[in-house]
Amino acid sequence: MLENHLYNLMEQMVEESKSLWRIKNTYKKDAAGCTNCTSFWDRLEKDKEAHIKEIQELVKAHLG
C-alpha cells in the first residue's frame, strides 16, 4: 500500500496532466484570435509542464 502523501502526489499529477491536455487540445484553439488569452494559455501550459515534471521527480524519489 502506498503512503498517503505519495498517493496525493500521484493524484495531483493526474489532475495536472488532464488540465494540460485540455489547455493544449481545447483552450488554446478556442482562444485563437485573442492575443491576451493565447498568451495566458501559453504561460499556463509551461507552468503545468513544470509542475508535472517536478511531481514526477518527487514520485520517482519515493518509489526508489
Image: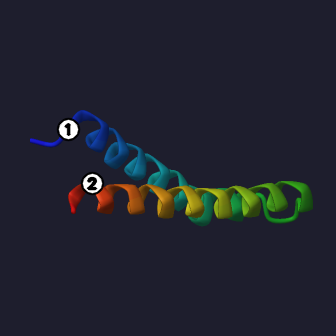
Q: Position of residue 23 (x, y in %)?
A: 61, 58
Q: Is residue 33 left or right of residue 57?
A: right
Q: Position of residue 53 (x, y in %)?
A: 49, 64
Q: Tell me, for residue 22, which label it has, or none.
A: none
- Per the image, the residue denoted by label 2 is 62
Residue located 83% across and 61% down the image: 39
Quadrant location of the C terminus in the rendered image: bottom left
Instruction: Using the numbered discs, state the Cα–Cα distance from disc 1 to disc 2 in whole angstroms.
Output: 9 Å
* Colour approach in the figure: rainbow
Q: Amino acid at mark 1?
A: Glu
Label 2 neighbourhood size at 10 Å, few (<14), some (14-19), many (20+)?
few
Q: Is residue 46 above or below residue 62?
A: below
Name the secondary structure under disc 2: helix
Q: Is residue 57 left or right of residue 52?
A: left
Circle 1/circle 2 CB separation < 8 Å? yes
Name the secondary structure under disc 1: loop
- Per the image, the residue denoted by label 1 is 3
Label 1 neighbourhood size at 10 Å, few (<14), some (14-19), many (20+)?
few
Q: Amino acid at mark 2?
A: His
Q: Is residue 23 left or right of residue 8?
A: right
Residue 51, quarter of picture = bottom right
Residue located 31% across and 62% down the image: 60
Pick out the residue farthest to the left: 1
Residue located 72% across and 58% down the image: 30
Q: Position of residue 31 (x, y in %)?
A: 77, 58
Q: Position of residue 5 (x, y in %)?
A: 31, 37
Residue located 27% across and 54% down the image: 62
User: Which is nearer the eye, 53 or 25?
Assistant: 53
Quadrant location of the N terminus in the rendered image: top left
Pick out the residue farthest to the right: 35
